[in-house]
Amino acid sequence: MKRIAYFLLLSFFLIFLQVSVLPRLLPDYFKPDLLLILALYLGLTATWLRGGLFCWYLGCLEDTFAGNDFGLFGIAFLIIFLAVRAGASRFNTESSALLLVLTFFATFFKGAVLISLLVLFSEAGRQWPVILSCLLPEAVLNTFCALLLLRFSLLLRRRFARGAGIPGLSHLDRRYES
Amino acid sequence: MLDLLRKYRTALLAVTLVLAALLLYSQNLRQGEERTNLFEKLVLRVTAPLQIGVMTVCETFSDWLGHYLWLVDTRKENDRLLEENRHLAAELSRLREVRLTNERLQKLLDFREQQALSALPAQVVTEDATSWFRTVMIDKGRDDGVREGMPVVVAEGVAGRIIRVAARQSRVLLITDASSAIATLVQRNRTRGVCRGRGDTLNFDFALREKDIEVGDLIITSGNGGVFPKGLPVGTVVRVEREEYGLFQVVEVMPTVDFSRLEEVLVLLKEEP
């Protein structure tokens, strides 16, 4: 219960950063997807049911602040979670570098899922050129943000909960500890 | 049977979740009277005070930062002049901001008086959460009389239309979003077409090849779509391409509104039936 409450708070904090703070610091139409990073982290660490439901919620939260059709990011995040969760057993989920690589490629995957859903279900099939043009910069930005979040979470752990491990990332590479 | 369910538990769970998500999405695709659902209303209600707070803090911080940098520059010259300069510069900067705001609001006021419909001024609070869609959040909602489908304009022209409404906030779909389409016409020769968003610019679609459209022509709303009143500026033609074959010509339009500097907008309120 406590963990769910933490995740809810964290999701609100990240979406708040994404829509209210970062657009003031970054150039126009150059926005990271912080909730995607959280969804990927869940894909590596959470159970099927809990992680799936929470990623669906994360997508719906993003839908509240993005785009025209509610539920679009909900499905996209859920599919991304399921894909990562299905492959998680083949990866070394304790490696933080995995999260960075996943973030980069998951941005493209998210773009592909969104384009497919828009073309199949919505009238906004013309959205794909806009999405394609933003994919690469967003993937780079998301990866950079994932790195910053990793460093920040480690800093927090060192200062406030030295003994506690971050689930799934308890044996982080030493290079992020410096 | 139970063994089978147990064996494929994970796959069944994944399929159920995806189906449920698809169901929710398709349910929201239907154009009903009320498109803002309970989840969105709840989230917007919770985040509204935070967003307005951040907007105020950011403005104060950028104001303070500007003054501080000015102070560092002038200190090199003279301590006495620094103090005087800082105050004057701060005052000048404040007055300039007041003048610019005044000009913007005056333009909006003039524009509002020209409109037959009553207009509600609103401030842009946040932008879209992603770089793929073009929406903004404004600080007026259902409590202020805003309803879904209402047109949103600025003095320069059409900005968009309301797509989601919460108690104190609303979301505006900008005309540059790919899912936006407006019934428009060329002001000079009344050629009709549909302006569709392309991210940063617009396409003037369905203009027949033989129609005379030139770079620099002003595109205005035709009033046919039932959303925007007739005669509002939408954009200016920046490119016209007529291929050898084909029924229509390709017309690119640059919006008259600078969406990167959207701060205050007017929501054109419709009369309640």
Image: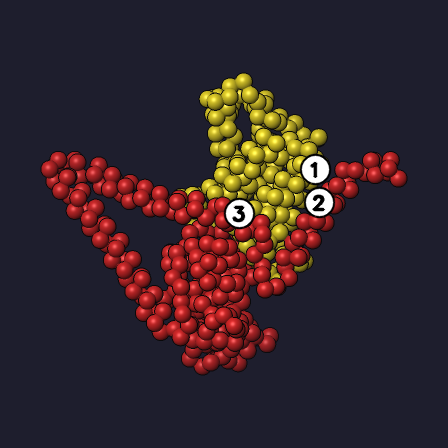
Chain colours: A yellow, B red
Q: Which mark is residue A49?
A: 1
Q: CA distance from mark 1 to mark 3?
A: 23 Å
Answer left or right for A172 relative to A178: right
Answer left or right for B116 relative to B20: left
Tell me which amino acid carries mark 1. Answer: Leu
User: What residue lies at 16% left-to-right and 47% top-to-bottom?
Assistant: B88
**Where residue B55 sits: x, y (%)?**
38, 47
Label 1 SS? helix
**Where residue B192 sits: x, y (%)?**
51, 77
Pointer 1 local density, CA inside 10 Å: few below 14, some 14–19, many at least 20:
few
Q: Chain of mark 3?
A: B
Q: Quadrant of the N terminus of chain B?
A: top right
Q: Quadrant of residue B104?
A: bottom left
Label 2 SS? helix
Which residue is denoted by mark 2 in the rendering? Answer: B17
Q: CA distance from mark 2 to mark 3?
A: 22 Å
CB-based contact (under 8 Å), mark 2 and mark 1: no
Label 3 SS? helix
Q: CA distance from mark 2 to mark 1?
A: 9 Å
